[in-house]
Image: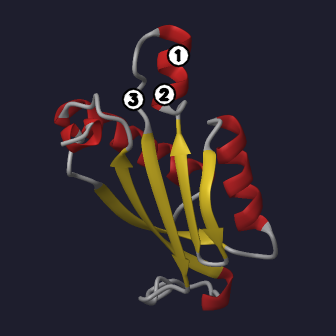
Amino acid sequence: MGLFSLQLQTSLTDRFYSLCLGNTLLLKACGFIEDYHAEILEVDETFLRLRTGTHWMKALIRSFRIPRVLEIQLHISPPQDDRTQGSSLPRSRNSYCQIDVEIRPASPNWTHEAFLEEAKRMLCVLRSYFMAC
């Protein structure tokens, strides 16, 4: 049984929609990555996996304490439901994308309550960066 067997086996998921014209989605993601010093773990056209915070081994060497690190996955796809029903303004479904988010603890020192509090805060931050609707 290793150190990571103590990790919480939980995650927080959410779905929101964002405007996707040209490179705007890429610019929004870059802004979040830069501001939160996120490490890109995996990326392709419809998927982005990030780690926020310092890797626990690096921080342990520097400060002798293990930071709380999150792993964030963003799955990007065309919207699955018609978000424009009931709207008086015609909107193209092609200009919006659906973003499914999953946030998981990526360090061994999270309590369930602390993880949920930080994951909910991070969801709010992501929504603001992607100007979610």
- Which quarter of the rendering shows the N terminus? top left
SS of the residue under disc 1:
helix
For the residue pair 23 and 17, the one nearer the viewer reads as 23
| Contact check, label 2 and label 3, Cβ < 8 Å | no
Q: Position of residue 84 (x, y in %)?
A: 51, 85
Kind of residue at disc 2: Met
| Contact check, label 3 and label 1, Cβ < 8 Å | no
Q: Residue at x 66, y 46 (%)?
A: 33
Give the mark nearer the N terminus: 3 vs 1.
1
Q: Position of residue 9 (x, y in %)?
A: 20, 51
Kind of residue at disc 3: Arg
SS of the residue under disc 3:
loop
Q: How many marks?
A: 3
Kind of residue at disc 1: Ile
- Per the rendering, the mark at residue 68 is 3
Q: Is residue 31 above or below residue 53?
A: below
Q: Which residue is mark 1?
A: 61
Q: Is residue 92 visible?
A: no
